[in-house]
């Protein structure tokens, strides 16, 4: 009887599993083709310096113009790509696009620092550093114009390897930013031994800032700012959507801000225009939602 039941289950589950494997395989094939056909592209979101009161750089965010599903955000395909072992290929592709863009801006007389997200999985081995080193050597981009964003996730698998990778990146002259800070579940202990140039306050703290419900987010942000500055790092606030949030973040001592208020992920041309805009009124920045290339 148990056997019959077991079989019944297998029959029930198999089509779903099969479907999952099939869509995973299709995604892998699509992704491989997308890389070859240049269907992957980058959107750039400005980083706004609160002291200089102007755009000081940007973050590259991956997009996929899928032939059937349309523009896809990374949350939908980056994890699948990693599962399929595509993380190195994808990262190489992103780094090459970023370096080419930095060169293009330099040719127009602009030095715009670009931050690149690199998956935690590539920090368990030497791959992240290797890929960055190759991209820099291949493009001749000054290392200080490249920043690597990584999450606390890197300290969960192989913290020693991650620490080594961080030091190697700094030796190359590349700066580092700890992304989504405050949402990971690793201890603060690693900050004793490892240095980051930037801590990025996760947008969950920023977005509950101006709620008048007595939440603790302003204390948390203030504490992150003190912690970061004590460690010699700067603080970038993510997900700033309202002028009230921006003004509170200024008061709390954040160094820079990023978010829809200051610019959605946009084209390279739009980010260059925002970079060239005179200091002063962030509301006057060209806000371009550039889903299109
Ligand atoms: P992230 O690095 O924390 O990037 C910030 C995400 O928040 C982006 O989503 C951005 O569009 C979104 N965002 C920015 N400002 C606001 C705001 O004011 N409000 C709200 N609600 N959202 C805002 P996106 O582009 O969908 O990227 C999601 C995540 O995918 C990124 O989080 C990053 O972890 C990952 N990712 C993006 N590009 C790459 C890449 O080239 N390689 C890898 N490995 N991961 C990437
Ligand atoms: Mg990021
Ligand atoms: Mg983030
Ligand atoms: Mg995030």
Image: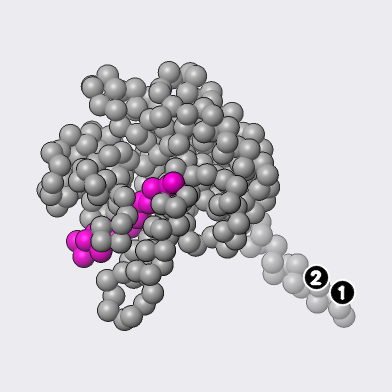
Q: Specify whether residue 30 is in view.
A: no
**Residue 250 picture quarter:** bottom left
Q: Look at the image and give the residue range highlighted in magenta.
A: 232-249
Residue in the foreground of this view, choosing between 260 and 54? 54
Q: Specify whether residue 119 is in view.
A: yes
- Residue at the location (66% across, 59% down)? 17
- Residue at the location (34% across, 69% down)? 218
**Badge 2 residue CB within 8 Å of ligand 1:** no
Residue to which mark 1 is pinned: 3
Cβ atoms at labels 1 and 2 below 8 Å apart: yes
Q: Secondary structure at mark 1?
A: helix
> Does 243 appear in magenta?
yes
- Coordinates of residue 257 in the picture (x, y in percent): 30, 52
- Residue at the location (51% across, 41% down)? 118
Binning the other alpha carbons within 10 Å of mark 1 as few (below 14), some (14 to 19) or many (20 upward) gives few
- Coordinates of residue 65 in the picture (x, y in percent): 38, 41
- Coordinates of residue 165 in the picture (x, y in percent): 60, 37
């Amino acid at each position: 009887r148990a056997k019959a039941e077991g079989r019944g289950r297998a029959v029930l589950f198999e089509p779903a599993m099969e479907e999952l494997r099939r869509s995973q395989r299709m995604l892998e094939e699509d992704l491989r083709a997308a890389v070859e056909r240049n269907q992957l592209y980058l959107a750039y979101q400005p980083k706004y310096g609160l002291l200089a009161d102007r755009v000081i750089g940007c973050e590259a965010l991956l997009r996929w113009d899928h032939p059937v599903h349309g523009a896809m955000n990374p949350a939908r395909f980056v994890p699948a790509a990693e599962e399929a072992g595509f993380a190195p290929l994808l990262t190489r592709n992103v780094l090459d696009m970023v370096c080419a863009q930095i060169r293009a801006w330099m040719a127009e007389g602009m030095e715009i620092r670009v931050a690149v997200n690199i998956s935690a999985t590539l920090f368990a081995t030497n791959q992240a550093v290797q890929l960055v080193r190759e991209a820099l050597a291949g493009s001749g981009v000054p290392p200080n114009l490249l920043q690597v964003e990584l999450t606390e996730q890197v300290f969960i698998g192989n913290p020693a390897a991650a620490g080594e990778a961080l030091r190697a990146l700094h030796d190359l002259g590349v700066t580092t930013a700890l992304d989504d800070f405050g949402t990971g579940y690793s201890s603060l202990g690693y900050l004793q031994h490892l240095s980051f140039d930037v801590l990025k306050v996760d947008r969950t703290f920023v977005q509950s800032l101006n709620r008048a419900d007595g939440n603790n987010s302003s204390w948390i942000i203030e504490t992150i700012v003190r912690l970061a500055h004590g460690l010699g790092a700067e603080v970038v606030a993510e997900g700033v959507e309202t002028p009230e949030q921006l003004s509170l973040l200024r008061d709390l001592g954040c160094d820079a801000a990023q978010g829809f208020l200051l610019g959605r992920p946009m084209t390279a041309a739009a980010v260059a225009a925002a970079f060239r805009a005179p200091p002063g009124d962030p509301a006057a920045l060209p806000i371009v939602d550039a889903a299109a290339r």
